[in-house]
Image: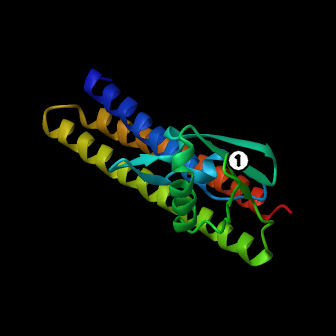
Amino acid sequence: MSEEVQFLLEETKESMQNALVHLEREFQKIRTGKSSAQMLDGIKIEYYGSLTPLDQLSNINTPDPRQIIVQPWDKNSLPLIEKAIMAANLGFNPKNDGEVLRITVPPLTEERRKEFAKRARNEGENAKVAIRNIRRASNDSAKKLEKEGEAEDVIKKAESDIQEITNTFIAKVDKLTELKEKDIMTV
């Protein structure tokens, strides 16, 4: 197998691994019954004229499974952070005590659990689509290599390997999605 084909296979694996990492990050944003600092990922605060991520303005702790504490380094930013959390529409109602924001994570209703499980399935499907797109691009690259003089049997083997890699990553996505759904639905 030539270096180009070997490189193509490695690149395919790496791209699919990145899709899997992205899926895991998205799953962290989906709430289960337990609180986590990742629930507040993606919240940005208008701070001195620029949008700043919440984790760059404060310390975020989860002292117990039902509570998140946001302790800003600048106490003057407390109302801004509170407003941004409310605007993010995460279903949280932060309590401002002048020092920190206490966010009580309400227990999930059955309806919300099903909603989050559906969102997890959608994220899983998005990851599968991304993996299939990577497969298509890799197969196209393999065909180009064939036109550039690579042996037909080498390209057939490469396409077979690409499909094998794809199947492996699709199975990983299914497993991660199943685990996340189980985690969400566990009371």
Residue 58 in the image: state x and y as whole percent.
57, 40
Residue 88 in the image: state x and y as whole percent.
53, 64
Give the camera-side residue of 50 and 114.
50
* Quarter of image, res 105: bottom right
- From this viewpoint, which residue is outermost toward the top? 3
- From this viewpoint, which residue is outermost toward the right? 187
Give the camera-side residue of 135 and 27.
27
Residue 97 in the image: state x and y as whole percent.
71, 54
Asked if residue 136 shows in the view, the reply is yes
| 23 over 30 or under it: above or below | above
Q: Residue at coordinates 45% horizontally, 53% vertically from top-left?
A: 45
Q: Residue at coordinates 77% horizontally, 52% vertically from top-left?
A: 67
Asked if residue 167 shows in the view, the reply is no
Residue 131 in the image: state x and y as whole percent.
44, 51
Q: Residue at coordinates 28% horizontally, 21% vertically from top-left?
A: 3
- State the SS at label 1: strand
| 120 over 55 or under it: above or below | below
Q: Residue at coordinates 79% horizontally, 64% vertically from top-left?
A: 185
Colour pattern of the rendering: rainbow
